[in-house]
Structure formats: structure tokens, C-alpha cells
Image (cartoon, helix red, strand yellow):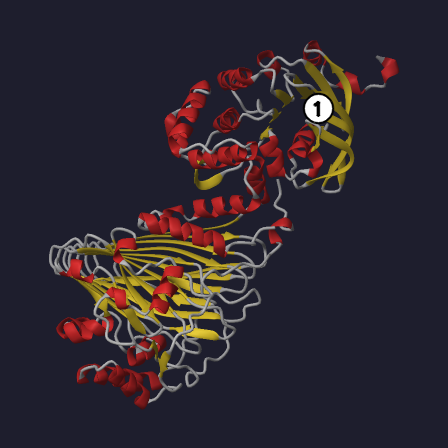
């Protein structure tokens, strides 16, 4: 469903991605790991179309369409969702209102009917239960005054409501305690299925105990230097990242 | 994530929906201002001598006054001898009922979304429609009359309820108050009058819709609202004007009087023509609005959504005379393109345990300049007075400006005065976050702005809150690339 070919990208004049190749099939969960500064988050943001990141070379196709030619909102509407590493606050706009506006735009694009207030409430109550969220949350402003963990949970909750085809999780585990991590992981696992894929960006193997990936890629200096099964993550946990950066001959 | 202004900066043209002109036979008086003109206006309205005298003393006072220069606004000289001070659609005959309103005028208001047929109206809203210098129709007059509520044009009130007009006119905004209020006192043409009798809760929203149509005319309306002991009224005004290259002057005066235990809510949705992108044309909205909480436990709330006008200069205030009286001011002011606004409030605490709340939200886009100017004065005898002020500014792009001038004059040591202020910018990261959820840039900005204004919109009657929100999104159209 997602094919990335020779992707190069830069931000603020600095080249971060130096030729990424990646292919994700429907139903698969891919993890992107790597040391700080390796380009993990850049990859997530480039896929989502962040305006500060400039693609200098390469192609990305999503269900056969040129993803890079789409503006960010179109990417969201065709089914690419990014859970932000740093979710943004929107003061004065309540969560329910925000989510309803987003959901109806996405539904309209898919040719589905917009949901009325009742249908919408039924849907989100169900999703809130999944993520163990309190109803009072709906009337609070988007991310304002949320703890770090609440913000991350809110991202996964939004994903559960919007039901994208591809979920890109940008370091969703950072700043979560073990209980919150479990809740978030359960939320993601509940969404796994033959018609949905995930790209999970993480620094630590811990998250992958809960969201078990099909493929693990290791990113270093803007390139994928290793790909493997879920065991690769364990190996990394054991040895750290430094051994990957040594020349191949010395391993 | 840093905020890149490049993409936020691309200003496109905005459209003013109410810019059309109605071609209608007019009755106008010669341009310019003199005692003769003042007499002519008074004669046209067949006014009693006492009112003519009041106008003349105002005119003489005005001759000695100078245009105020302290505002944080700039505009070229206004030629007061070039303005036409009275223009009215020629009446075909005397109106016996609403059905006889000139079809052209009816169509004009229809187009503005203000049908003058009572059955088509938003239920629960009575409208006084003012076209240039005269009131052309007032709906639900009879129904309100049965409850003892008087809601009519100012001119009618002068004829039918002279004792009330005489008793209250100029008691809140004296004819010597300021240059523009004094000018208004000399030449005011029409406006609305409302009187709510003792103990009556007015069952519907009263509203006035002001339309400037004629060329080179000024609009000088005057509104007077009186709430007797224990009465309640919610009043709303809306305004629009055609698009023209020259600036037009709108200098209104509004006076509110709340007696013991009375409450007046006064809401404004101002959408005068703001001028074009380069700042050509548009209305100079130089308005004096003041309410007097004359009685104990009385309350006056001003809510304003100011999106139009080339220049807005207004400070709806409250004189808190009665003990335990409450004054509130909730404001959203937007300036886009070359618009300028210098607006705020005055809260004058005279009585004991008086309370005031000020919530001001300024939004600047394009080259817009937005100034909050507010005075909180606590008099010597105002023991236990309390004021809370909150002034927030939102900037869209980096060519606009926001300014805050709070004035505090505290003469009583028991006073409690709080002031909070903030300035924020719509960030690229906020917009991107919304877009990543499927919303367009425009939708994102509207959402962020409406969140910013929520505390003020909450104060508006439901139907108008929706209207105000729509208006705000139109007025900021094209402010984000």
C-alpha cells in the first residue's frame, strides 16, 4: 500500500533523509528504530506532508497514487494519519467539536454521509471506552492543559475515530508510563487488520513488546541500514545502536 | 517546531457580501453643516422646540471642539462641510402597516437576511430597520405594546413619548461629551428607542439593523434604551453599507439606563464596509456608547463583534452608579488588510461593591492595526469595587499589529483590580495539526480563531453567535495562504 523509493528530504537546509527505500503491505506493522538524529521523525513528518520539510528526491506512492503531490489535508483524507510526537494545543476549541469537523471532512472525501451529533456521540463513546478515557475530556479544549500521557492517548483516540488506512506513530511511547503505554498499545492493536497498516517510529524496543511488528527497520544517518523481523528490535535493545554504524567488514 | 511566516503571509482578496447599492428615490438635504441645516433636519422630523434647542446648543458646543487626536489610528482630514447630513428614501405615502414598506427597501433588507415580514422573522426577534437617516419599519410593535414595552424608531418616540425622551436624552452621554457625540447630538436623524416597564422581562430579542445606502452621507443614529425597575431586555444591532471608494462617516450615540435590579444586554455585530485591500473607502465608525447602571443591583452587558469598518473608534462603557451594580464588556475586534481599530471600554465605579468584567479579543491579519484601550476608574466612595480585565491579541502573519493601553485610576484602597493580557500568533504547527486531521488551512484558521473568541461568542444570543462566527470567517478570508 505504501512504497517509498530513494527518498531524500531536508529541513532548514540540512539533508536528513538520504535515500529511504521502504515497502509496506496492507495489514503489516513496520517499526522504524534508530538513534537520535537518524531521521525517524523526519520520515514520519515527510509522509504527513509537513510544510517545513522539503523532499529533494525520490517517490512515495500510497495505494498507487503519488503521495508527495498531495497537500497535507488530502493525505489525511485519503487515509494517512500521523500521531504527533508533540501534539499541538488549540485553546478554546473543544475536542468533540474538533474531532467531528475532522471526521466529517474525511467521511465526505470518502463519499460517506456526514454523521449527525447523535451518531457521532455513539461512535466516540465506543472509542473512548477503548482508550479508557473520561467523558469530561470531550468538552476540554484540544490538548490544552493535558499531561504528556493524555496528549498521546488523545492522538490514538483520534486515530481510532478517523480510522485511517495508514497510521504513522511518531514516538508515541515517549513520555508514557507503563500503564499508559499498555492502553495506547491496546488501542493500536484493536485497530490492526487486513485493511490497515502502521508505521511505528520509536527509539525504544519497549513499545514493540506491546505492538508486535512484522518488520523492523533500523535507520542511521538518513538511510535504512538493517531490516528484519521482530527479533531485530530485541537485538538492538541488547547491543545498542553503535554496532550498526561500524563498517560491515568489522562485524 | 518553529513558525514559518511565509505560508501564513499570502494575503488574498476578501469579499464583502453586503456591498450592493439600492437605487431608490431619495430625499436629501444640501451638503454641509450650519444652524440652518440643524433647523432643517429638526423641521423635517417635525420636532418640538425643546429638541431643536437641544440640537442647537449641541451644534454651538461642537463649533468650539476639536477632533480627538489621541487614538492609535490615522486618517486624512474629514471635510464636515462635504457631508450630507440627512438622506431618506422618499415615502410614497404614509405607511399603515409593514406590508406597505417600499418593495425596493424590503428587498434590500431581504437580501441582507433581515426579512421585514413578521412571519418570516427569526422567532423571538423584533427588528427596527434603519435605512440611511430614517427608520423604515419596526416589527412586532403591537405585540410588544400589549406588554407595555415600547419599541419604535427614535423619531416616533419623540412624538409619542416625549416625556421619556426628554427625561433621559443626554443623561448618559451629555451633549458636550466628545467631538463626535456632540456632532451627533446636533444632527442625529433616527435610531431606535426601547422602554421596558417595571418588572417586565422582554420576551423577545429587540434588534436594530442599520443600513447606509446613500452616497456621501453620514449616518448619525441615536439609540436610547431604558429598563425600569426589575426589567430585563436583550438588544442586538447589526450594520452594513455599500462598497464605495470614499470614506463615509458613521457617528452614533447609544445611551442605556438601567434602574434598580434591571438588566440590559446590548450586543453589536458590526460589519460596515471595511474598504478595499489597499485601504480605499470604508466606513469611519466613530461611536459613543455608554450605559448607566443607575439603580442598585442593576447590570449592563456590552458584547461587540467588530469585523467591518475602515476605522473603528468606540468604547462602550458603564457608569456603575447604583450599589452592587455590574458592568460587563465582551469584545471581538478583527482588523484585516488596512483596517484600524481602537476600541475598548470605560468602567466607572461610583457605587459600593460594584463589579466590572472586561474580556477583549483582538485579531489582526494583513496590515491591520488593533488597539485595546480601556479605562477602569474606581471613585473615592466606591468601597469594595472589583474589576477583572483580560485582553488577548491574536496575530495572523507578521505585518499586522496589536496594542494594549489599559488605564487604571484607583481612588479607593479597598478596590480589587486584576488585569491579564496575552499576545499569541497562529502557528504553522497549529495549522499543520488541523490539516493532518483533514481540515483545510482556511478551516483551520477559522477553528483556531473561533476558539480564541469563545468567551465572547458565548455571550451572544444563540442565532447571532452562529452569524458572528460566519462573519468572522468571511472577514479573515484569504488571510492565510
Q: Residue visible at 52% across and 28% down?
A: A162
Residue nearest the viewer, comparing B410 with A27: A27
Q: Within 10 angstroms of label 1, few (less than 14), some, or many (20 or more) residues?
A: some
Residue nearest the viewer, comparing B115 with B176: B115
What count of labels does the image hold?
1
Q: In which quarter of the image is the N terminus of chain B?
A: top right
Tell me the chain of label 1. Answer: A
Quarter-wise, where is residue A83 in the image? top right
Quarter-wise, where is residue B66 in the image? bottom left
Residue nearest the viewer, comparing B211 with B170: B211
Is residue A227 depicted above or below B354 in this figure? Answer: above
Residue B453 percent across, percent down from the top left = 42, 49
A125 on left or right of B410: right
Is residue A234 depicted above or below A138 in this figure? Answer: above
- Report if residue B406 is visible in the image: no
Q: Residue visible at 43% across and 26% down?
A: A124
Residue A139 percent across, percent down from the top left = 39, 34
Is residue A14 depicted above or below B197 in this figure? Answer: above
Q: Residue visible at 42% across and 29% down?
A: A120
- Report if residue A8 is visible in the image: yes
Is residue B410 depicted above or below B244 in this figure? Answer: above
Q: Name the residue under label 1.
A: A35
B431 on left or right of A145: right
Residue B459 percent across, percent down from the top left = 32, 49
Q: Which residue lies furthest to the right in this view?
A: A249
Residue A46 percent across, percent down from the top left = 68, 34
Q: For the residue labelled by badge 1, is the local secondary structure a helix, a strand or a loop? A: loop
Amino acid at each position: 500500500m505504501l512504497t517509498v523509493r530513494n527518498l531524500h528530504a531536508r529541513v532548514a537546509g540540512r539533508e536528513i533523509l538520504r535515500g529511504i527505500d521502504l515497502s509496506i503491505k496492507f495489514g503489516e506493522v513496520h517499526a522504524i528504530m534508530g538513534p537520535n538524529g537518524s531521521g525517524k521523525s523526519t520520515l514520519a513528518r515527510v509522509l504527513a506532508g509537513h510544510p517545513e520539510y522539503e523532499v529533494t528526491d525520490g517517490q512515495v506512492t500510497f495505494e498507487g497514487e503519488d503521495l508527495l503531490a498531495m497537500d497535507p489535508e488530502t493525505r489525511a483524507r485519503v487515509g494517512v494519519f500521523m500521531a504527533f510526537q508533540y501534539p499541538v494545543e488549540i485553546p478554546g476549541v473543544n475536542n468533540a467539536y474538533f474531532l467531528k469537523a475532522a471526521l466529517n471532512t474525511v467521511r465526505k472525501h470518502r463519499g460517506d454521509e456526514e454523521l449527525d451529533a447523535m451518531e457521532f456521540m455513539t461512535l466516540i463513546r465506543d472509542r473512548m471506552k477503548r482508550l479508557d478515557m473520561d467523558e469530561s475530556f470531550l468538552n476540554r479544549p484540544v490538548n490544552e492543559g493535558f499531561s504528556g500521557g493524555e496528549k498521546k492517548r488523545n492522538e490514538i483516540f483520534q486515530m481510532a475515530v478517523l480510522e485511517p488506512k495508514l497510521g504513522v506513530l511518531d514516538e508515541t511511547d515517549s513520555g508514557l508510563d507503563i500503564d499508559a503505554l499498555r492502553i495506547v498499545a491496546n488501542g493500536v492493536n484493536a485497530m490492526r487488520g487486513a485493511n490497515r497498516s502502521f508505521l511505528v517510529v520509536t527509539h525504544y524496543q519497549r513499545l514493540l513488546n506491546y505492538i508486535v511488528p512484522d518488520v523492523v527497520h533500523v535507520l542511521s544517518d538518513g538511510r535504512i541500514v538493517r531490516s528484519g523481523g521482530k527479533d531485530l528490535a530485541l537485538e538492538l535493545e541488547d547491543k545498542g545502536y553503535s554496532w550498526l554504524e561500524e563498517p560491515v567488514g568489522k562485524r | 517546531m518553529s513558525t514559518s511566516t511565509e505560508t501564513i503571509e499570502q494575503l488574498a482578496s476578501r469579499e464583502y457580501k453586503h456591498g450592493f447599492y439600492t437605487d431608490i428615490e431619495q430625499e436629501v438635504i444640501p451638503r454641509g453643516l450650519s444652524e440652518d441645516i440643524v433647523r432643517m433636519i429638526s423641521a423635517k422630523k417635525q420636532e418640538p422646540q425643546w429638541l431643536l434647542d437641544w440640537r442647537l446648543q449641541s451644534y454651538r458646543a461642537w463649533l468650539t471642539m476639536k477632533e480627538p487626536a489621541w487614538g492609535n489610528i490615522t486618517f486624512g482630514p474629514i471635510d464636515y462641510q462635504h457631508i450630507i447630513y440627512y438622506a431618506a428614501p422618499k415615502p410614497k405615502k404614509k405607511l399603515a402597516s409593514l406590508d406597505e414598506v417600499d418593495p425596493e427597501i424590503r428587498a434590500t433588507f431581504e437580501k441582507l437576511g433581515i426579512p421585514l415580514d413578521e412571519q418570516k422573522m427569526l422567532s423571538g426577534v423584533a427588528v427596527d430597520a434603519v435605512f440611511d437617516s430614517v427608520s423604515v419599519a419596526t416589527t412586532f410593535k403591537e405585540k410588544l405594546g400589549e406588554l407595555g414595552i415600547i419599541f419604535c424608531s427614535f423619531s416616533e418616540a419623540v412624538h409619542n413619548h416625549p416625556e421619556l425622551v426628554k427625561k433621559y436624552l443626554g443623561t448618559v452621554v451629555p451633549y458636550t461629551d466628545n467631538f463626535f457625540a456632540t456632532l451627533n447630538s446636533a444632527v442625529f436623524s433616527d435610531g431606535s428607542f426601547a422602554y421596558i416597564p417595571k418588572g417586565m422581562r422582554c420576551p423577545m430579542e429587540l434588534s436594530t439593523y442599520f443600513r447606509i445606502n446613500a452616497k456621501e452621507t453620514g449616518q448619525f443614529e441615536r439609540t436610547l434604551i431604558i429598563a425600569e425597575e426589575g426589567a430585563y431586555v436583550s438588544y442586538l444591532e447589526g450594520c452594513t453599507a455599500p462598497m464605495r471608494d470614499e470614506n463615509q462617516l458613521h457617528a452614533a450615540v447609544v445611551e442605556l439606563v438601567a434602574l434598580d435590579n434591571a438588566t440590559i444586554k446590548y450586543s453589536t455585530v458590526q460589519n460596515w464596509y471595511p474598504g478595499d485591500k489597499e485601504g480605499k473607502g470604508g466606513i469611519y465608525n466613530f461611536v459613543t456608547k455608554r450605559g448607566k447602571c443607575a439603580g442598585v443591583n442593576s447590570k449592563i452587558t456590552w458584547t461587540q463583534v467588530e469585523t467591518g469598518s475602515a476605522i473603528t473608534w468606540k468604547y462602550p462603557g458603564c457608569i456603575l452608579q447604583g450599589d452592587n451594580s455590574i458592568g460587563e464588556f465582551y469584545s471581538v475586534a478583527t482588523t484585516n488588510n488596512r483596517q484600524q481599530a481602537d476600541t475598548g471600554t470605560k468602567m466607572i465605579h461610583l457605587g459600593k461593591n460594584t463589579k466590572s468584567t472586561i474580556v477583549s479579543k483582538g485579531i489582526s491579519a494583513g496590515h491591520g492595526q488593533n488597539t485595546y484601550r480601556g479605562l477602569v476608574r474606581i471613585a473615592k466612595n466606591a468601597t469594595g469595587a472589583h474589576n477583572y480585565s483580560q485582553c488577548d491579541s491574536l496575530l495572523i502573519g507578521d505585518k499586522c499589529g496589536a496594542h494594549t493601553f489599559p488605564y487604571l485610576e484607583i481612588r479607593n484602597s479597598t478596590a480589587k483590580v486584576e488585569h491579564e493580557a496575552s499576545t499569541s500568533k497562529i502557528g504553522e504547527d497549529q495549522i499543520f495539526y488541523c490539516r493532518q486531521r483533514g481540515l483545510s488551512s482556511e478551516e483551520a484558521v477559522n477553528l483556531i480563531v473561533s476558539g480564541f473568541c469563545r468567551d465572547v461568542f458565548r455571550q451572544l444570543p444563540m442565532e447571532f453567535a452562529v452569524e458572528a462566527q460566519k462573519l468572522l470567517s468571511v472577514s479573515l478570508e484569504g488571510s492565510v495562504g
